[in-house]
Image: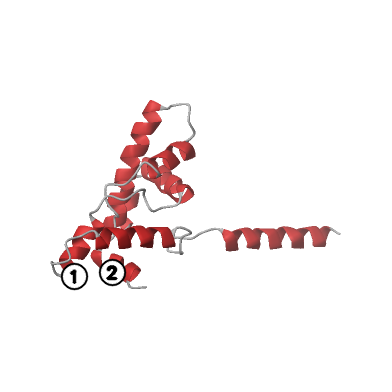
Amino acid sequence: MHCYILSLHAEFILCIIYIMKKKGSSCDFRHRRAAELRAAFFSQDLYSTCDEVMKKTVKTPSSRFWVEPERARDVISRFEKDPDSLTRMYPEKQRMYRALYEKYKALHLKNPSESKINCVTMAIYSGAPEFFLSPATARSILYQ
């Protein structure tokens, strides 16, 4: 009986590990992000070169920060403890998390009774100043 319970517990842990998202895993919102990126791409002046259009596209404001709230909360918590923790990320991700952190901080000061995950979620859905993607990454998303 005791071994059976341990076996179930191990299976549950493996199931949780399998379900959890890892850094670099595909996200649940990738189709919405691609659609919004496509709309931003086609709203640009198409008389420019493709590289110029991609550079303008990624600098277009976005409806949200394209990161899951739980992942953002974890990164922001790590950033609060160690400001150098973002240095291992790509420059676009660093800029995104710094911008998101600034929005989170402002929301948390305005609503101190709200939990961290709620403030992070509100910051994510408040809109982003850009897509925080490299032109090459945007191109690969658009051409999928």
The amino acid sitting under disc 1 is Cys
- The residue under the point 43% across, 62% down is 31
Labelled pair 1, 2 in contact (Cβ < 8 Å): yes
Q: Position of residue 10 (x, y in %)?
A: 70, 61
Q: Which label is found at residue 117?
A: none
Query: Which residue of the protein is positioned furthest toward the left in this rendering?
Result: 48
Nearest to the observer: residue 62 or residue 8: 62
- For the N terminus, which image quadrant? bottom right
Q: Is residue 83 visible?
A: no
Along the polypeptide, which appears first: circle 1 or circle 2?
1
Q: Position of residue 6 (x, y in %)?
A: 76, 59
Q: Is residue 102 visible?
A: yes
* Mark 1 residue element: helix
Residue 15 lies, with reference to residue 112, above or below; the image says below
Q: Rounded to the nearest whole Å, what is the CA distance between mark 1 and mark 2?
A: 9 Å
Query: Which residue of the protein is positioned furthest toward the bottom in this rendering?
Result: 144
Nearest to the observer: residue 117 or residue 5: 117
Q: Position of residue 107 (x, y in %)?
A: 38, 32
Side (left or right) of 144 relative to 129 = right
- The residue under the point 44% across, 45% down is 73
- The residue under the point 31% across, 59% down is 39
* Mark 2 residue element: helix
Callout 1: few (<14), some (14-19), or many (20+) C-alpha neighbours within 10 Å?
few
Q: Which label is found at residue 50?
A: 1
Q: Which label is found at residue 139?
A: 2
The amino acid sitting under disc 2 is Arg
- The residue under the point 55% across, 58% down is 20
